[in-house]
Image (cartoon, rainbow, N blue to C red):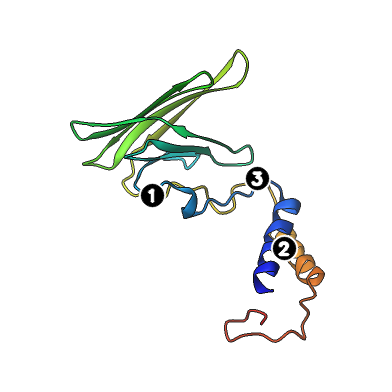
Amino acid sequence: MKLSRVLVLSFFALVVLGPGWAVVSAAAKPSTTACLQDDNLNSFITWDETTGNYMFMTCGTNSMTLTGVGKVGLVNGIQTLTDSKPDRRINAGLLTSQLTGKATVMFSPAVGIWQTITVNDTKTNPTCSCPIISGGGYTPLLVFLVLVAAWRILGLRRSAKLSKAGWPT
């Protein structure tokens, strides 16, 4: 019952708040990863250093994700990922000694149209995730009202027992 309440709340928040509110869990990342995140937190790319499975994501209200399998390599301390398909071209390099690097992602959102995004990572501790709340322009009051409405829909009223942590039991 508790899990179903969490799922309903999550679904309700996604439907009401929209896709601009992005959460990327650690489970979405490949297991042995190389990670480059743009210094402005606008995009990131992670890839499995052995299999070449990768995930590229842009953050914000118009977020998008590309996943695939590319070719990986390690030459002179630079971990590389390359992928070339009809709809994308990806080149990424991570300096393993500095944990910094750069990636260029070209993709075709429509026939004959190409977009290029550069991931420039000069910081050594990237999170490779979007901010928990990445836009949407919603005020804290609206978020509060949505959560209150969800709690009422689920029948969680003031009379519900609370645990020591303050959560309904």
In the structure shown, which secondary structural element does the residue marked by tag 3 occupy? loop
- Amino acid type, label 3: Gly
Give the Cα separation between the discs numbered 2 and 1: 29 Å
Residue 115 is left or right of residue 19, and the answer is left
Task: Point out the frontmost of discs 2 and 3.
Answer: 2
Q: How many marks?
A: 3
Label of residue 20 in the image: 3
Name the image quarter holding the C terminus: bottom right
In the structure shown, which secondary structural element does the residue marked by tag 1 occupy? loop
Please report whichever mark, 2 or 3, sits nearer to the chain's N-terminal start. Answer: 2
- Amino acid type, label 2: Val
Residue 125 is left or right of residue 166, and the answer is left
- Amino acid type, label 1: Ser
Using the image, determine if residue 22 lies above or below residue 164.
above
Category of crowding for the residue at label 1, using alpha-carbon neighbours closer than 10 angstroms: few (below 14), some (14–19), many (at least 20): some
Using the image, determine if residue 157 lies above or below residue 104.
below
Please report whichever mark, 1 or 3, sits nearer to the chain's N-terminal start. Answer: 3
In the structure shown, which secondary structural element does the residue marked by tag 2 occupy? helix
Category of crowding for the residue at label 3, using alpha-carbon neighbours closer than 10 angstroms: few (below 14), some (14–19), many (at least 20): some
The percent position of residue 4, horizontal first and vertical second, equals 69, 67
Reading the image, the residue beneath label 2 is: 8
The percent position of residue 80, horizontal first and vertical second, equals 31, 31
Label of residue 31 in the image: 1
Q: Closer to the camera, 50 or 143?
A: 50
- Give the quadrant of residue 11: bottom right
Category of crowding for the residue at label 2, using alpha-carbon neighbours closer than 10 angstroms: few (below 14), some (14–19), many (at least 20): some
Give the Cα separation between the discs numbered 2 and 3: 19 Å
The percent position of residue 154, horizontal first and vertical second, equals 78, 71
Name the image quarter holding the N terminus: bottom right
Task: Point out the frontmost of discs 1 and 3.
Answer: 1
Residue positioned 36% across, 38% down in the render: 51
